[in-house]
Image (tube, rainbow, N blue to C red):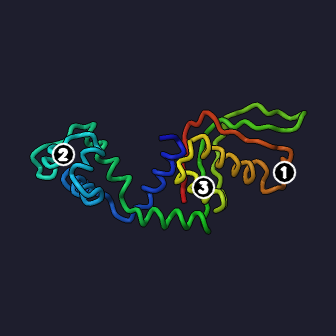
Amino acid sequence: MGEVEEAIERADREGFTRQPPKTLKGRINFLVKQLGSTRAVAREIGVTADSVNRYRRGARTARPDIAARIEDAVRSRWQPGVRKRRRRQAATTGGVTIETRARFGYTAPVGTTDDGRFRRLTVHLPPEYARRLFDAREQGASDRQMRDIIAEGLKEVYFQDGGHRAMGLTDVAITDIDYLDLDY
């Protein structure tokens, strides 16, 4: 999972209206309900169906690596309606706020410096970029493609200030991301 994908996932988790199950038994029962069978849960987390049944009964505890896989599987499926509603709102009216520290490079006219440098930015992008970002994610876009969407939005909103400056700036590239957070 790329940095942009992880940032979207973290932003989704911040919008939960209820917390996911805390116990191993509760998590396994949730996954069985979501996936339909213990065999499907076993495939998802990389154990046998017998182990899944033992987890359900409380007869076995999960190793830390398996417990982490179970938690990830639950969190990725938790409250899909809340996630969709928040994404739809961001894509239609709210937009998305990007907070990052990364190296930004750009193509600029002759006589100006185009050397990349680290910047810490917090920029609110319009709904159009949120929609493009979410659509790209659902279509299986790579992290590079999603970074390009964010870079284009930052070029328009931050670097060019909506058409008021840096009009000769043609391309912005994001590299060497220290951190990237999204909020919507």
Count of marks overlaid on the render = 3
**Residue 97: which numbered mark, if any?**
3
**Type of the residue with mark 1:** Arg
**Type of the residue with mark 3:** Thr
User: Which residue is label 1 attached to?
Assistant: 165
**Cα distance between the residues tagged 2 and 1:** 61 Å
Where does the C terminus fall, quadrant-wise? bottom right
**Type of the residue with mark 2:** Ala
Is label 2 in contact with label 1 (beta carbons under 8 Å)?
A: no
Image location (x, y in percent) of residue 147: 62, 44
Residue depicted at 62% across the width and 56% down the height:
132
* Relative height, residue 113 to residue 49 (above, below): above
Image location (x, y in percent) of residue 24: 21, 50
Q: Mark 3 or 2, which is nearer the eye?
A: 2
- Looking at the rendering, which quadrant does residue 111 occupy? top right
Q: On the rendered structure, is 71 left or right of 3? A: left
